[in-house]
Image: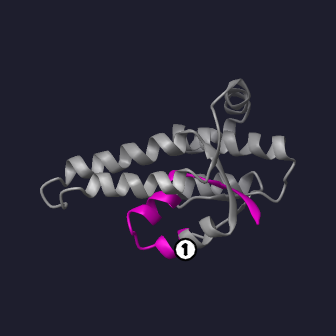
Amino acid sequence: MTLSYFDSSILLAIVLDEQKQEEAYSYWQNSIRVSSILLRIETVITLRRIHETNRCILAGGWLDAKVSILDDFLASVNYMVINAKIEREIYTRKELAQCRSLDAVHIATALQFRVLTGDESMNLYTFDKAMHTLAEHYQFKTNSL
């Protein structure tokens, strides 16, 4: 199995039964999963936002069911908290400004995982185009878009 960093777009594709669900799940299955604590926060907030926006058309219990599925997936992830080393990555790597703030935190966290593990072949999986481009810039193996 390969060490793989996941952002929320991959996990949400699985939990929300999106078009790329099978692709996302194939990355998830074949990996030792790592991420920032942001993964937990972003995914649950997204589910709650979808529920609030679509409450009138979603079945009762939709949110509880999706959060339960999400929790099962999240239980298999090794997390890194945002710390001074990640903040230093953000301050020193100007290229991180090419994506959104939380995506920059994800990439900085992946860079720290790579330093800690010494695994230069680590994957970084995302469906976000700007984050994907930066992952390639930092020489992570990644999915195709």
Q: Residue 58: x, y in percent?
A: 19, 60
Q: Is residue 132 left or right of residue 65?
A: right
Report the side of 71 relative to 89 (left or right).
Answer: left
Question: Which residue is painted at 75% across and 51% down in the image?
Answer: 138
Q: Nearer the viewer, residue 65 or 106?
A: 65
How crowded is the residue under tag 1: few (<14 C-alpha within 10 Å), some, or many (20+)? few
Say which quadrant the C terminus sits in. bottom right
Q: Position of residue 62 (x, y in %)?
A: 26, 58
What percent of the width, then of the height, locates residue 29? 62, 69
Residue type at mark 1?
Glu
Is residue 11 highlighted in magenta? yes
Q: Which residues are magenta?
A: 1-24
Q: Secondary structure at mark 1?
A: helix
- Give the residue furthest to the left: 56
Q: Which residue is mark 1?
A: 23
In the rendered image, the quadrant that contains the N terminus is bottom right
Residue at point 55%, 74% (across, down): 23
Q: Is residue 39 magenta?
A: no
Quadrant hosting residue 123: bottom right
